[in-house]
Amino acid sequence: MSVTEHQKSVYIAGQAADARISFDIEAEGMTLNLGPQHPATHGTLRIVVRLDGEQVIWADPIPGYMHRGYEKLCEVRDYAQVTTLINRIDWLGSFANEVPFILAAEELMGIEAPPRAQYIRTVLFEMARLANVSLFLGDMGVQLGAITPVFYAFRDREFVLNLIESATGGRFHPNFDRIGGLKDDLPKGWIEESKGALERIRSFCDQMEDLLVGNIIFQERTRGIGIIPRDVALDYGMSGANARASGIDWDLRRDEASPLAWKHADWKVFTHPDGDSFARYWVRLQEVRESTRIIEQLLGGLPAGPIRAKVPARIRVPKGEAWVHTENPLGEMGYYVVSDGSPGGPFRCKIRTPSFSNISVVPWLLRGVYVPDVITILASLYFILGDIDR
Amino acid sequence: MSPVAGSVFGIHAAYWNTALLKTLAVLIVAPTGALIIVYVFMFKMMAHMQSRLGPMDVGPHGTLQPVAEAVKWLQKEDVFPARADSRVFALAPLVVLVSTFLIYVVIPVSPRAVAADLDTGVLFALAVSSLSVIGVLMAGWASANKYSLMGALRAAGQLIAYELPLVLAVVGVVMQAGSLNLNTIVLAQAHFKLFGVGGIGFFAIPQFVGLLLFLVAAQAELTQTPFDMPIAESELVAGYLTEYTGFRFLLFFIGEFATAFALAALAATLFLGGWYFPGYGLHWGGLAWGRQLVGPAVLVAKVLIVAFFIFWIRFSFPRFREDQLQAFAWKFLIPLALVNITLTGVLKVAVHA
Amino acid sequence: MPEPDAVGHALGIPKGFAKGLGVTLKNLFTPAETVQYPHEKEAVTPRARGVIALKEDNCTVCMLCARQCPDWCIYIEGHKDKEPPRREGGKPRTVSKLDRFDIDYSLCMYCGICVEVCPFDALHWSPEFEYSEPNIADLLHDKVRLGQWEDTVPEAPVLEAGAEAPKGKKK
């Protein structure tokens, strides 16, 4: 297929604009490159910012420095291999990445995992949320200058990671979900150990409340900063805690019929009307606390039974398409799996990641913002590069 | 003022020898103070507050780590920006260091041991501490980096803004003691009777507002969190220290922590009684040199207490934005200091009347 | 969230500061839980995916693990030998012999697909992890070394209440 003249001129204009960005002094305003190596962006995100004195005129995020070709990889690997690879998309909440993919494959094959497996899947999913979001709670402190909370975050999520490791074998990349259930059952004493870990996370949340939320300096730095109104958030496809902090009452765990076990626990969805950076922090803090309650309830009522349904040794997914999305720690993550019925892997797998949509609001959001607040806003949006670039 | 007769720590010497010894003493004490602060607070207290252990390998419990750090910085390549103004670039850390070392000159460590017993001690100390602003501006300018200059200007703005609360906080103490001489201020605290009880008359209690103001202003003078925007600005734009590495950065580093020790020592002297503690004989005719060592020990203990608070706040709070920082200084701290001065004056006249 | 009144807000500022300072002070006096590796070692959970061990006797050179590895980090070479028949008057048997079985740990993702897929239970996980090398070529563990890891393979852990007993030979 040949490239049209229009496409050519657009491409050349883009390259020229990119070249101009490298110039230091411009007629009005200063162009600043945030990244790709930068302590404030969680990974290799490049944001080109045009400043007029202290204010941002425009900002342009340039992702792609970490693109690993996941969707192509999914085409040339089979289902077991894809399961282990997609752990690495959102590497902090890694079990959560496997779940929608496996659910899509189960939907195509018409297999239902036994209840015990669904419960444990949900528990591990929520633990991924604990590991992921508790790091955010500490990290936001660091971006704002409070160096201590992030150490508490790392210390207290170690207990969660140890739990995940004792069940799955891997702290960060569990590779535990299988079509039809899970790889193994829980080792003895796991439920007892989980109580200690959940208690640590709860005390960590209390400490964050005292150290950051109750601190007037933190409030002055985050209230009213980076307000995303409700309709703008909907327009840009934001999801997860970012959307809920703008007042959108949408949580896929509650609103989407899912074979996972969230409906068996009693829990609340938290929203905040303000839509500023403080709201995003507050919503995530409450979500972590609520997750510990979900895990506790599910582990208290864990049904006995097999851990995996009867699945043929050679997986062969019949022809079809399935779309499954879940409320991942970062937002709404979904897999659109297309199978052509051949043995081996998916024919095509489209991965919808939350951070990619979440940072699409950055050009709109950073206009007119003062330079010190840019860091605050980026920290509060909480994206992970693996999630943006795949 | 002529040198006090008798010996200092058992050393009798003619005037010029004494001046040489005193210079050496200051040159040794200042970096040692910096190293103590770095080890106790930056390595160990910070580590334990963050639920970790800090350096443990170099020396028992990592006590030699500051030495290792110094050696590390010394052996780095001396990088010089090509377009930098070389003389100003080289002089900037020295200006900051000199301004710090000069503070040590007036702090009394025992009834007779002070490098220069100036009648205007307090004024001198605060004046030379503000020389560091020049060093910061020199560093930012000479780096030939637009962002360094911006960072230096912001830092200078912050340092100048917080000079006023620092000075005004001390005025209450000066009024109560009736003198600018630091030794006189310590003696005034020794003799001060608080609610009729002698021996606990440290100015921290009647001048607690002044102490708070001094600590907050000192925190800002040291560009520590919550006032560390000039340094942390290197997240987005380069701070004034960016182009410095190796030996020059070590000088800035030592300067920062030596200033911390010095300002804490000033606070200890002005508000906590300096080398005095109840029972320490004030009659130094014939004071044995062994007993004279108690003074510095007491002062160091008080410095560590003051520094504890400074660093405790540093590790616990997020940072102010530049405009919030300035508003805090001009709209809150300075009016509070003026109120404190007024009250002190009124009470002094009323109580003595 | 409703905003507190002005006086309450003003009083809340030092209270907020005090609470934050209290948290750090409390942590100052709580002993750190740091495990000073390498002077002290942590107990690793038995299921931890540290290194893969090979039981050579079970391997039939079926190549499933090498095929399924997402990174292609397993290198297998084998040959077929003719062995005498088991009984008198039978046909000679063909037996696969393993010549080379290397796992390149510089590529290995520690996903465990090879261990799971092996039909003959020749590969096992071991929680050992202290095998880093200064030379990257030494991260290629050959047959002999992989066999040595077998001693470190733990027993299958007892499962939690309510779990079904594992069927077959898999952990």
Image (cartoon, coloured by chain):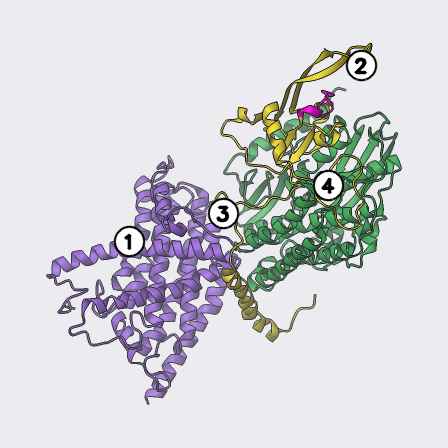
Chain colours: A green, B purple, C yellow
Asked whether residue B137 is in view, the answer is no
Is residue C60 shown in magenta?
yes
Where does the magenta region start and end? C56-65
* Cα–Cα span, label 4 and label 2: 55 Å
Q: Which residue is mark 3?
A: C36
- The lab-note entry on whether marks 4 and 1 share a chain reads no
Residue type at tag 2: Arg
Q: Nearer the viewer, residue A170 or B185?
A: A170
Q: Residues within 10 Å of mark 2 (few under 14, many from 20)?
A: few
Name the amino acid type tagged 4: Asn
SS for tag 3?
A: loop
Between label 3 and label 4, give the one nearer the viewer.
Answer: 3
Q: Nearer the viewer, mark 4 or mark 2?
A: 2
Q: Viewer-nearest of labels 4 and 1?
A: 4
Residue ID for mark 2: C87
- Does dot 1 land on a helix, a strand or a loop? helix
- Residue that label 4 marks: A97
